[in-house]
Amino acid sequence: MDEAIIRAEQLNVGYGERVLLQNLNFVVRRGEVFVILGGSGSGKSTLLKHLIGLNPPLAGHIWLDGIDIATAQGATRAAALRKIGVTYQSGALFGSMTLAQNVRLVLEEFTQLPEEAMDLIARMKLDLVGLKDFADHLPAEVSGGMQKRAAIARAMALDPMILFLDEPSAGLDPITSAELDALIKRLSRNLGVTFVVVTHELPSIFAIADRVIMLDRRIKGIVAEGDPRKLRDESDDRWVRQFFNREPEPLLT
């Protein structure tokens, strides 16, 4: 699990002339669960948007399985982006379509498979996330946790190498969140998929993360990187230890 599947080099991200994060250098290793975390306003979601190609970097490079998506164009860029799947915080399912139809939509858009094959793949993907018996339900007819799992099934429709998850546990109760954490670990272990997860939920971070990078808006960069348990217990940075141990700032007297 040492091979880098994503590599950021001297990366600056932001909007227009506003730089939120600068001089970022990190790698995501093939097959690991990699978590991007930090306080509110630290730039987690902004970094994610750049990693999936929605926003161009202000400077630097993003290498995705050997292709620099910051400079690649046309068919080369499209081929690189086909290697990723994305889920968003809300799930972003189409409410008028069943779960199976939501998954199948990706296959209709990007493949020329026969109808029967698309139906079969859609139901297989839902089975992978434990929703085999809910394929014909509308999103409104299932729980929030099921909607999140269906979104993961849709993101896996084209068998991506990397899954990007934006705040997957947001809005879920602790039990449902723990079930989603277990699903992420199982998919990572059984399918070898690389996960890049944006979250600030400490229980999820400790449950799923092989490695993390921690963003800090004060320095506009990475303040810590590594195993979250070691950062919690051994970091030399007081703020990092506070974050992982959920400790408030000392009261001024």
Image (cartoon, helix red, strand yellow):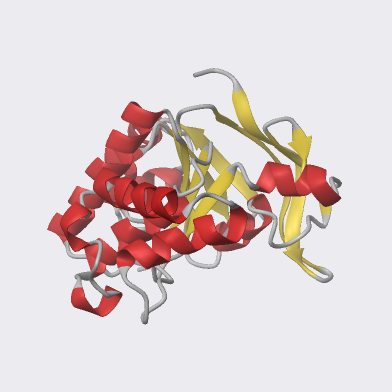
Q: Nearer the viewer, residue 130 or 253?
A: 130
Q: Is residue 215 left or right of residue 149?
A: right
> Is residue 235 among what the camera can see?
yes
- Give the residue displayed 78% in from the left and 58% down from the top: 56
Q: How many marks?
A: 0
Residue 123 picture location, percent across and down? 30, 52
- Residue at 54% from the left image edge and 67% from the top image edge: 41
Pinpoint residue 28: horizontal percent, then vertical percent: 57, 33
Residue in view at x 39 percent, y 52 percent: 116
Residue 230: percent from the left, percent from the top? Answer: 37, 29
Image coordinates of residue 188 in percent, x first then y, are: 37, 33
Residue at 62%, 62% (x, y): give it: 46
Q: Residue furthest left?
A: 175
Residue 217 visible in the snapshot: no
Is the C terminus in the top left, top right, bottom left or bottom right quadrant?
Answer: bottom left
Location of residue 139 (image quadrant): bottom left
**Residue 173 or 68: which is nearer the viewer?**
68
**Taking 168 as reference, is 73 above or below it?**
above
Is 243 placed above or below 30 here?
below
Residue lying farthest top? Answer: 2
- 182 left or right of 240? left
Taking depth in this image into account, of 48 and 215 the one nearest to the observer is 48
Asked where in the image residue 220 lies, by quadrant, the reply is bottom right
Viewer-proximal residue among 206 and 107: 107
